[in-house]
Amino acid sequence: MTLSRRKLTLGLGAVALVAACGNGVGSRSASMIDARVDSTLTQLYSDYPSTQDLAAKSVGILVMPLITEAGFGFGGAYGEGALRVGGGTVDYYSLAKASGGLQIGAQQYAHVLFFMTEDALSTFRRSPGYAAGANIEYATPERGEKLGAETTTALAPVIAIVFGQSGLRLGATLEGVKYTRIIP
């Protein structure tokens, strides 16, 4: 399959849009990432109080405070965040995502992964580039809704919560997400 010049231009335009949306591309300042993580967790716990119980039962939390995603035919997403274990930051990560398919638009959101087992956390930390897969349970609580950690932890070793969406992006895509350790 050959890539037309138009599709390549549209794809590169989407990547440029992601880079231009103020998502921290290239910021890589540990203090800036930690401040954004603190703010994101404060918002998460305020908007969805039951996530505090989930956090208390988890062995680690990966917080991606701002992910910017854009696409027009081809698309991409990027964000930077921190892995917290025992309440403190132990590593910093970037999230990169590529997509292709029927899509148009841009959006920003926060993304938090709760690692519910030691095995899931150690697998994540040992991998040179962790790809999100079928072992993640996505929880989408409505404002004020209780998220039952007892039932979800039995179903999945990793629970993801996506919240704080802004922008508009339409379409169905085939996507791949990869988390990679960074040194800010």
Image (tube, rainbow, N blue to C red):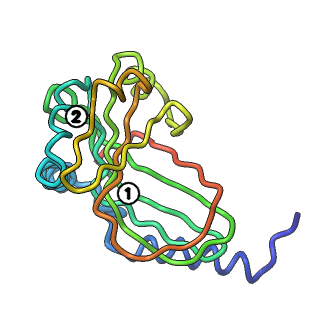
Q: Secondary structure at mark 2?
A: strand
| Position of residue 117 in the picture relative to residue 85 (left or right) | right
- For this view, does 124 lie left or right of residue 27? right
Count of numbered tags: 2
Mark 1 residue type: Gly
In the figure, 153 relative to 6: above or below? above
**Residue 48 pos. (x, y %):** 18, 49
Q: Earlier in the sequence, mark 2 or mark 1?
A: 1
Q: What type is the residue that disc 2 sits on? A: Arg
Q: Quadrant of the N terminus?
A: bottom right
Q: Which residue is mark 2?
A: 84
Which residue is located at x 43 percent, y 27 percent? 156
Q: Residues within 10 Å of mark 2 (few under 14, many from 20)?
A: some
Q: Which residue is mark 1?
A: 79
SS at mark 1 in the image: strand
Dot label at residue 27: none
Pick the residue in front: 183 or 157. 157
Q: Residue at x 34, y 62 (%)?
A: 109
Residue 40: x and y in percent read 19, 54
User: In whole angstroms, how far apart are the C-alphas of marks 2 and 1?
Assistant: 16 Å
Q: Which residue is located at x 21 percent, y 24 percent?
A: 57
